[in-house]
Image (cartoon, grey):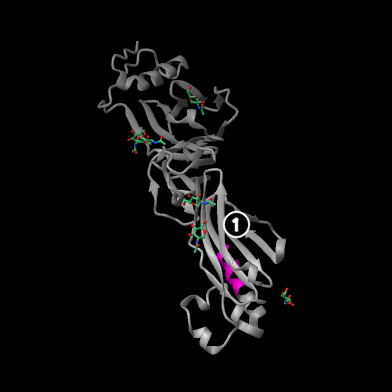
Amino acid sequence: MCVCGELLVSWRCVVLLSLRLLFLVPAGLPVRSQGDPQSDNRVMDNITVRQGETVFLRCPQGNIVTHTAWLNRSSILYAGEDKWSVDPRVSLVALSQEEFTIRIENVDIPDEGQYICAVQTRSRPRTTSVHIIVQVPPKILHLSKDLVVNEGANVTLLCLANGKPEPSITWKLVSPVAHGFASEDEYLEIPAISRHKAGTYECTAVNEVSADVQTMKIVVNYPPSVSESRDVGVSVGQQAILQCVAEAEPPADFEWYRDDRRIFNGFDGIQIDNTGKLSVLMFFNVSEVDYGNYTCVATNKLGSANTSAVLYEVIEPTSSTLLQGPGAVQDGNCGNMGAHASLCLLVVIAVQLLLKF
Ligand SMILES: *[C@@H]1O[C@H](CO)[C@@H](O)[C@H](O)[C@H]1NC(C)=O
Ligand SMILES: *[C@@H]1O[C@H](CO)[C@@H](O)[C@H](O)[C@H]1NC(C)=O
Ligand SMILES: *[C@@H]1O[C@H](CO)[C@@H](O)[C@H](O)[C@H]1NC(C)=O
Ligand SMILES: *[C@@H]1O[C@H](CO)[C@@H](O)[C@H](O)[C@H]1NC(C)=O
Ligand SMILES: *[C@@H]1O[C@H](CO)[C@@H](O)[C@H](O)[C@H]1NC(C)=O
Ligand SMILES: *[C@@H]1O[C@H](CO)[C@@H](O)[C@H](O)[C@H]1NC(C)=O
């Protein structure tokens, strides 16, 4: 009987036992060790195949082959042209004096492992083994959901993927600006997140087969901050614009005040126009009572900020007054432009439109 003491050669024992079971090998034939010149055990190059593909297992035969079989570990797939495997994916391709080839379709991970072709000739048994390696494209299984956080929060993002070989995972901030800010790990830790780290994050899982890429978004909320408004000088009867720019997330709501009195849209020939981070206060026909101190208050759920600007009178245009005070002609001031007032206003509005982006 076969005595298979050593685990290392156990597969060979299994082959011989199987062949004996098939009455392929005379019962008295001793199991030969690897060094035995009378047996012949070859190892073929590994076959690497992608999940879902078809693999062909080809085994050279010879002139005086009496019996031959393909085995998957210890189970016989084919003994000669008799199919032993019940797996419909396994089929015979060729059985001749030259070759004994079988095919496994739609290969999957459990198919990975050693396959052995056992050949019995009149003189001695021969085995050929081949290792099938199954590769699987990476797939991202879990990605952190889109997040809305307050500035200063500690954020941890997670991206889990599988695949064979094990995919490597990288995190990147890709928009609004690619920051070169990245992690080569399943986890991306962002301690005390700042508004500059808001945006679209991309997780990439890549292995030899291919890559899987998915994105998620982080919105970072922060209270408004307003930039200093400029005072505007204008003469009676002209148009004027006061403007207020607030950085905020979520975007700020704006309110305008003249001293302590709230100004409402369309009231007293004044129009308030809010777009994104910009609010403008438009005077269509400035009169004496309009001169004064105006305050813009920008508010969101995290806080508020304000800035003030003075609308002051400029004496009717003469070349000397134009040269007088430094703030006499300012951004947003179309008062001194005379006949070009509406053209100037257009330019100012165009500049403001650009500011909105
Ligand atoms: C074949 O694959 C096995 C298992 O991954 C590995 O141990 C062996 O070194 C490989 N052999 C060759 C020749 O690449
Ligand atoms: C090979 O054997 C393994 C383990 O028994 C099994 O899961 C797999 O389906 C088999 N593959 C084929 C092609 O027979
Ligand atoms: C963020 O983590 C640091 C260090 O672990 C901790 O000191 C801080 O309190 C955390 N901040 C928040 C908002 O949880
Ligand atoms: C501006 O207002 C003044 C006084 O109310 C008026 O006389 C003048 O016609 C107005 N100008 C325009 C362009 O509406
Ligand atoms: C305008 O009003 C604000 C708020 O009331 C005040 O802080 C600021 O000093 C005033 N500016 C001028 C020039 O009076
Ligand atoms: C404007 O901001 C200051 C602090 O920066 C605050 O004291 C003041 O109350 C604010 N004014 C308004 C009208 O919100």
User: Which quadrant would the C terminus be assigned to in this image?
Assistant: bottom right
Q: Is residue 285 left or right of residue 322?
A: right
User: Which quadrant would the N terminus be assigned to in this image?
Assistant: top left
Q: Quadrant of residue 208?
A: top left
Label 1 packing within 10 angstroms: few (<14), some (14-19), many (20+): some
Q: Nearer the viewer, residue 151 or 46?
A: 151
Residue 43 shown in magenta: no
Q: Is residue 295 visible?
A: yes
**Quarter of the image where ligand 3 sits:** top left
Give the answer, above or below, for where 35 lies relative to 56.
Answer: above
Name the residue carrying label 1: 257
**Secondary structure of residue under mark 1:** strand
Q: Residue furthest top?
A: 1
Whether label 1 lies within 8 Å of ligand 6 gets the answer yes
Span highlighted in magenta in the image: 348-357
Give the answer, above or below, for where 320 lies relative to 332.
Answer: below
